[in-house]
Amino acid sequence: MNRRKIILLAALALSAFGLILYGCARESAEPSGEGVPPPPPADPSENTETPTPEKPSPLSQTEREQRRISITDGKFTVDGGSKPIWINGANTPWNKWNDFGGGYNDGWWDNHLAALRENGVNAIRVWINCNNDQNAVLIGEDGVVSGVSEKHWADLDLFFATAERNGVYVMATLLSFDHFKSKQAGRWRLMVQSDKAVDSYIEHYTLPFIERYQDNPYLWSIDLMNEPDWVHEDEKCGKLAWEDISRFFARNAAAIRKNSPVLVTVGMAFPKYNADGSGYEGNKVSDAFLQTLFADQDAKLDFWSPHYYDWVGQWYGVPFTSKPHGVRSDGGWGLDSSKPAVLAEHSANGSAGSTLIEDYTSLLENGWQGAMPWTSNGVDGNGGFEELIPATRHIAGLYPDLVFPLG
């Protein structure tokens, strides 16, 4: 074995060791700019009493279509594709772990969304089901889904009305790798490995969710699973085959696209499994891969939504200094150019060597279609409201028509 091969193998071993250490490493924190109005108090959600929510004024069909986010020429748009919108966003993954069907507090969400909107945030990413500890989704020991709790739907009814009332778009994350290492882990692993069980999930959860909320234009997109990379790589999460994980995505994406205008994506942890070419393991959510597993032209995602934390940079480059598409040698971050890309998780504390304002600015200037730092409400050590809002205010102040194109 020559010296070059030895060095290459050593580097790959270090990479694998680092990824295994990280896999599920940002453990879920389980229970535990100019031109916009000045910031509210440091804790905008201090009032946690749950009021009787005011119903938003009914929107006409024309208004709903005007506000719906779609994709036109590789960019997110509203108003029937005539006005671009840049996702000046954030993650608000939960207030209380497993909010919906658990300890949902509409007063907290109403206050927090109002504060975010006032400070330039136009979209958030929310975990609709964190790991199913509250049994929101009724899943049997064989992985077959039979229904959804009434409280889950009731809480979500309040939540989406609150999002609409505050004018904040929602990327709804339906599953996470956390399901696959929870007390119900065996059930979720069996579910994704069985077409019959996947179909039961679609019939009793995905489609009812879509049918219930698709008329609300503030349901911007569905994120089918948070960081499935760890379901494949981490022993704690089952180390399932990509063929099973991605077949689940393919079948769900096809069902959503056939029945709804809501956009669909998957929040990949890093570009290792989100890109083709040298240095990557192949795009496990590409059109070609998904349609190989499920022969349907609607078995595809609408946009890329990868995540980034500083540990990734040494292996796959830094998105803030890269265009989302193309190979690294040409200044790209490896993603396929057929779809727009939003950086759907990155630290609200900013990245190594730059501030969050600089990160947002770089993403916008490099052609990314949005930024969604983790988090707006400080669920762990990656920053919160006070760290977030200087950046969102800055971008909203510089580009008001791009952040709030409909006013």
Image: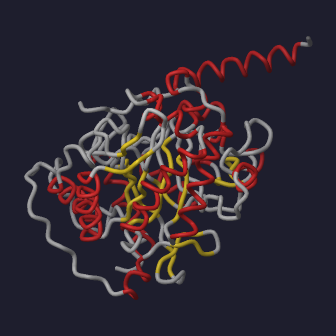
The quadrant where residue 13 appears: top right
Across and down, in percent, residue 5 comes to 86, 18
Residue 195 drawn above or below residue 7: below
Viewer-proximal residue among 150 and 235:
150
Residue 95 drawn above or below residue 219: above
Across and down, in percent, residue 56 comes to 22, 75
The quadrant where residue 208 appears: bottom left
Q: Quadrant of the N terminus?
A: top right
Residue 44 can be seen, yes or no: no
Looking at the image, which residue sits at the far right?
Answer: 2
Q: In the rendered view, how is the structure colored? A: secondary structure
Query: Count of labels shown?
Result: 0
Q: Residue at x 40, y 29 (%)?
A: 182
Across and down, in percent, residue 333 comes to 67, 47
Q: In the displayed structure, does residue 272 sit left or right of residue 188?
A: right
Q: Residue at x 36, y 67 (%)?
A: 212
Across and down, in percent, residue 329 comes to 77, 45
Residue 343 drawn above or below residue 71: above
Q: Residue at x 65, y 22 (%)?
A: 16
Residue 235 drawn above or below residue 319: above
Q: Residue at x 33, y 49 (%)?
A: 92
Viewer-proximal residue among 181 and 150:
150
Q: In the displayed structure, does residue 353 sit left or right of residue 382?
A: right
Q: Quadrant of the C terminus?
A: bottom left
The quadrant where residue 280 appears: top right
Residue 121 can be seen, yes or no: yes
